């Protein structure tokens, strides 16, 4: 059963998130908050990490940078040298990365990523 709209209220069909953001903005409301997935595949996670540059680097000439490091490269180097063998095994062999997995939080902490940054990476990973 459908509820009746208040008198004078019109209806509209919203086709995508951009339109929803525009409609909410017209009423002074923030856009939709992306839902953080509970888990992503290891491949999705690594693709998201590969898309992030951690150190902008130094521009030595126009458009040429030295010192840029992708977050995936930094995480791989850190985990390869990690003193806890279980962390190395998990990073290399886990098929699924769960947001609540303690290794995810620990690696994030070691990479100076806060919970919001990790959530953002999970949202990005879910798009792959």
Image (cartoon, rainbow, N blue to C red):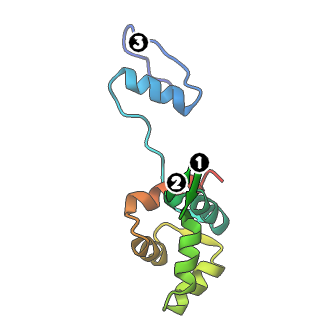
Residue 37 visible at all: no
Residue under numbered circle 1: 63
Position of residue 117 measured from the top left corner of the image (x, y, whole percent)? 43, 58
- Residue 72, quarter of the rendered image: bottom right
Q: Is residue 9 left or right of residue 76?
A: left
Is 16 or 86 nearer to us in this picture?
86
Of badges 2 and 3, nearer the viewer stands 2
Question: Count of labels shown?
Answer: 3
Is 74 or 89 nearer to us in this picture?
74
Report how far apart the C-alphas of labels 2 and 3 lie in the structure.
55 Å
- Residue 126, quarter of the rendered image: bottom right
Report how far apart the C-alphas of labels 2 and 1 lie in the structure.
7 Å
Mark 1 neighbour class, 10 Å CA radius: few under 14, some 14 to 19, many 20 or more:
few
Q: Would you place residue 91 above or below residue 51 in this image?
A: below
Q: Would you place residue 51 above or below residue 109 in this image?
A: above
Of badges 3 and 1, nearer the viewer stands 1
Report how far apart the C-alphas of labels 3 and 1 lie in the structure.
53 Å
Residues under numbered marks 2 and 1 in contact, where contact means CB atoms less than 8 Å apart? yes
- What residue is shown at x 55% (from left), y 25% (from top)? 14
Position of residue 99 measured from the top left corner of the image (x, y, whole percent)? 49, 66
Q: Would you place residue 47 above or below residue 96 in this image?
A: above
Is disc 3 placed on a helix, strand or loop?
loop
Position of residue 23 measured from the top left corner of the image (x, y, whole percent)? 44, 23
Q: Is residue 95 left or right of residue 86?
A: right
Residue under numbered circle 3: 9
Is disc 2 placed on a helix, strand or loop?
strand
Q: Would you place residue 75 above or below residue 81 in this image?
A: above
Upstream in sequence: badge 2 or badge 3:
3
- What residue is shown at x 38% (from left), y 62% (from top)? 115
Is disc 1 placed on a helix, strand or loop?
loop
Numbered tag placed on residue 59 in the rendering: 2
């Amino acid at each position: 059963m459908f509820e009746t709209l208040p008198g004078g209220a019109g209806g509209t069909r919203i086709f995508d998130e951009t339109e929803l953001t525009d409609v909410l903005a017209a009423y002074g409301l923030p856009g939709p908050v992306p839902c953080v997935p509970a888990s992503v595949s290891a491949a999705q996670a690594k693709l998201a990490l590969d898309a992030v540059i951690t150190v902008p680097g130094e521009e030595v000439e126009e458009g040429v940078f030295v010192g840029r490091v992708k977050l995936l490269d930094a995480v791989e180097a850190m985990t390869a040298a990690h003193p806890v063998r279980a962390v190395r095994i998990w990073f290399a062999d886990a098929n699924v990365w769960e947001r609540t997995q303690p290794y995810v939080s620990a690696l994030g902490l070691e990479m100076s990523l806060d919970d919001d940054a990790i959530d953002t990476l999970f949202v990005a990973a879910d798009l792959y």
